[in-house]
Image (cartoon, rainbow, N blue to C red):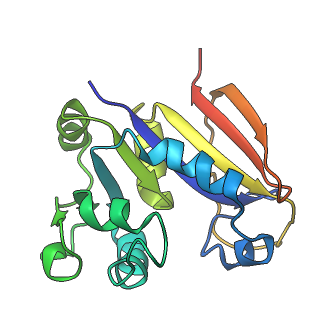
Amino acid sequence: MGAIRVHEFTTVDGVVDAPMWTVDYGFPDDLAASIGALTAPAKGILLGRTTFEMFAPAWSTRTAEDDEGAPFFNDTPKYVVSSTLTDAASVWRNSTAIGGYDAGRIRELKEQGDLYVSGSATLVRALLADGLVDELHLYVYPLAVGSGARLFPEGSAQELSLLAVERLSNGVAHLTYGPAA
């Protein structure tokens, strides 16, 4: 069975909403290598509709010359969890809308190989609740923005185990969590 690895950019106060604040910190080689290690084993990309609709125009026209991550995002099969999107393939090649969230369907995809998830906070909350996340990679930026969508909104609870900590050259802390032991 494959693993589901989730990647989230977040602030120290837990905001994950449209992380435009990452731009000020650049994308140094060690950050690229860290994310590359997450994407390398992936046989598929699992995305929520909102993230898919943000990624599609940003990635679909990029080439390897523009960004070394472009071949991964464009060539890897993408599975979009959405009850409203029906034709993902016409939006971005190698994309399939798989319907609304269904833990059983996600397990079937996971059985086919490793999956990579970026952003998609609503989807990630459901995956965590159903015990489907094997690794949660939080890239914590050294700022607090005060408001915005959070991965763990007030009132939610989630127990995790810390697996690894990495300090990146741009001041970002890469924290890796797994299911609670």
- Name the side, left or right, on which 168 lies relative to 76: right
**Looking at the picture, how far across and down is residue 174, in whole percent?**
72, 44
- Name the side, left or right, on which 54 lies relative to 17: left
Locate the N terminus by quadrant: top left
Image-quadrant location for residue 3 = top left
Q: How many marks?
A: 0
Residue drawn at (69%, 73%) of the image: 148
Residue drawn at (17%, 36%) of the image: 108
**Looking at the picture, how far across and down is residue 56, in whole percent?**
34, 78
Q: Foreground residue, 64 or 60?
A: 64
Q: Is residue 111 above or below residue 88?
A: above
Image-quadrant location for residue 49 = bottom left
- Name the side, left or right, on which 79 lies relative to 42: left
- Name the side, left or right, on which 66 lies relative to 20: left
Residue drawn at (71%, 39%) of the image: 175
Q: Which residue lies furthest to the front in this view?
A: 65
Q: Can residue 54 be seen in this view?
A: yes
Q: Is residue 151 visible?
A: no
